[in-house]
Amino acid sequence: MSNAKVLPLLEPEAVAPCCPPLNERPMSADEAEVAAKMFKALGDPVRLRLFSAVASHEGGEACVCDISDVGVSQPTVSHHLKKLKEAGLLSSERRGTWVYYRVEPSVLAAMGALLAGAAKTA
């Protein structure tokens, strides 16, 4: 029997939409800062691949051991996953020696709402 601790997943706080839809009103400086942080995190091809790997993984959660084959070294994978976490797009939980990542659906919904309004006017 292992003496490794399994830490519980922290429940993300209810995330209010970061910003109004783009066609509703001009964003405030704070709203633009939040949105830019999320989109910047997804602006890197490796991060986008990692995010997609987690989002498409069965159950919406993936062990880093299952998603690290993106053509860069393990430390670089860790760096990119950290950036996705800092942007609020992923959460993580350590289970023994592995870290499991999951997508924050409320943040995705907020990003989708931000862009959906703009798509209706196009």
Image: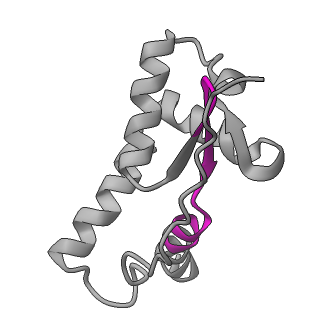
Q: Is residue 42 left or right of residue 64?
A: left
- In the rendered view, would you say 35 is above or below 79? below
Indicate yes or no whether the magenta region holds residue 101: yes
Give residue 22's quadrant in the image. bottom left
Give residue 53's quadrant in the image. top right
Give residue 109's quadrant in the image. bottom right
Q: Residue 6: x percent and y percent?
A: 63, 40
What are the residue bounds of the magenta stretch? 94-110
Q: Is residue 75 left or right of residue 66?
A: left
- Residue furthest to the right in view is 58
- Residue furthest to the bottom in view is 24
Q: Is residue 84 left or right of residue 35?
A: right
- In the rendered view, would you say 4 is above or below 9? above
- In the rendered view, would you say 109 is above or below 36? below
Q: Residue 116: x percent and y percent?
A: 56, 76
Q: Residue at x 51, y 27 (%)?
A: 46
Q: Which of the pair 1/67 is nearer the observer?
A: 1
Q: Which of the pair 120/98 is nearer the observer?
A: 98
Give the tally of numbered discs.
Answer: 0
Q: Residue 78: x percent and y percent?
A: 46, 25
Indicate yes or no whether the magenta region holds residue 104: yes
Q: Which of the pair 54/99 is nearer the observer?
A: 99
Q: Residue at x 30, y 57 (%)?
A: 36
Q: Which of the pair 85/52 is nearer the observer?
A: 85
Q: Residue at x 50, y 30 (%)?
A: 45
Q: Quadrant of the N terminus?
A: top right
Image color mode: one colour
- Residue furthest to the left in view is 29
Q: Residue 40: x percent and y percent?
A: 35, 47
